[in-house]
Image (cartoon, rainbow, N blue to C red):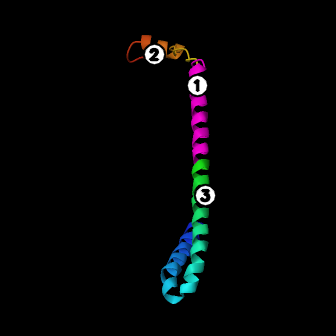
Amino acid sequence: MPPLLLFLAGFAAGAGAVAIAPALAPEAARNVRPVLRTGLKLVITAGAAARSAAMEAAETIEDLYAEAQAELAEAPPAPQPPPRRATATRRKRARAPAGTDA
């Protein structure tokens, strides 16, 4: 099972337990609340860390792209091949009258 689905299944099970806990055991509900608050703090912290890492990665990619563009702009243009000249056989065929083999 992919980790994301496993996480979502665990989250759903925990949310369901929190929803029915006060009705089943009021004592347990009081004890679960601090655990859930700690879990949410961890999720918020992990989300902030992931967001920060993603922003750094995006900035690195943007820097690399800008450097590559600058290098391409500074590089001299690629030399163009000289124009193709007609070969001797083409010249003979072009000059030979129609109907004769050259």
Q: CA distance from mark 1 to mark 3?
A: 38 Å
The quarter of the rendered structure image containing the N terminus is bottom right
| Circle 3 residues within 10 Å: few <14, some 14–19, many ≥20 | few
Describe the element under mark 3 as helix, strand or loop.
helix
Q: Which residue is mark 2?
A: 93
Describe the element under mark 2 as helix, strand or loop.
helix
Q: Which residue is mark 3?
A: 45
- Is 31 magenta? The answer is no
Amino acid type at circle 1 is: Ala
Vertical comparison of 90 with 58: above or below? above
Amino acid type at circle 2 is: Arg
Describe the element under mark 1 as helix, strand or loop.
helix
| Circle 1 residues within 10 Å: few <14, some 14–19, many ≥20 | few
Q: Is residue 97 left or right of residue 67?
A: left
Q: From which residue to which does the magenta span run?
A: 54-77
- Percent across and percent down for residue 64 are 61, 34
